[in-house]
Image (cartoon, helix red, strand yellow):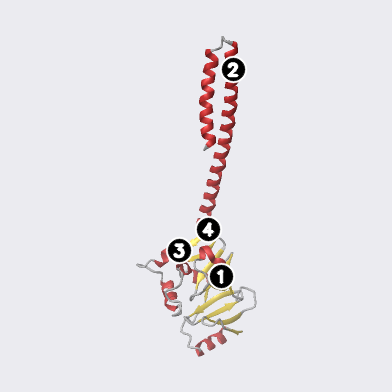
Amino acid sequence: MIYILTSILSGLFTLITLILVIIHSRKKKVRNQWLAAFILSLFIFCSASAISAIKTAIIVKDIVIEGTKEGIAELWRDDRAFLLDSTNINTQIKRLKEYAPNNFKGKEPKSFYTYFGFRDWYRFPLVYPYSLNCIDEINKGYLCDEREVTNLQTDGKKTNQLNIGDISEIAFDKNMLLAKRGFENQPKSYLIFFFDNQRIENFKTMQEVMNRAHELDYSGPEQFITLKEYALLF
């Protein structure tokens, strides 16, 4: 601001001194005095104008760049708050909220159900506080515990990535997750993950995992679905 004000005042003084130089053009001594004043004021005017222009350009640049970064980030951010619309709540989210354990029910952060990732990171909620996460493509994922996260947009780093990856197909009820591990030509295996205590049981075939699930009174779908099919439920 000071440089803009200096530029304006020095510009006015430059104009005044120029007029005085012209008026006193026949009086050499007086003319030279005003000419010196004119040159000095012109120098101050040019310097202040240049500095003001540079600072203005820097400010504009910062605003544009930061605004562009934020705009791009907003485009990459997959936040679907509309899924919790009380008049038309998403069916799958409604089911997940019903599955939430009693000690968590009603306390889950909204972002747990509405934040689906950023750029090439994809995230899909399961029974609270667990989620499936994928990188680059939605074909295999890993399991995360998000009980320490209050807002996935701001403190997602608190997510606890469990040592359960390469999940390609799933089925679950409120008590357990049945998962197929392995993708395409990779070796396949199956597991049951218990939501209450994070216990894991491993199996070699789907028949084995389904038999064990029925022994445990599993009440979810009999058919596994891919992660892409699960993603389409939201």
Residue 54, x across and y down, in percent: 58, 37
**Label 4 Cα crowd, 10 Å radius (few <14 / some 14-19 / many 20+):** some
Q: Are marks 3 and 1 in contact (CB under 8 Å)?
A: no
Callout 4, which amino acid? Trp
Q: Which of marks 2 and 3 precedes in the sequence?
A: 2
The answer to which image quadrant residue 122 occupies is bottom right
**Residue 187 appears left or right of 126:** right
Q: Which residue is mark 1?
A: 159
Residue 32, x across and y down, in percent: 60, 15
Q: Which residue is mark 2?
A: 33
Determine the residue positioned at 56% across, 44% down: 61
Q: Which of marks 1 and 3 precedes in the sequence?
A: 3
Q: Are marks 2 and 4 in contact (CB under 8 Å)?
A: no
Q: Identify the element where label 4 is drawn.
A: helix
Cα–Cα span, label 2 and label 4: 64 Å
Q: Which residue is mark 3?
A: 80
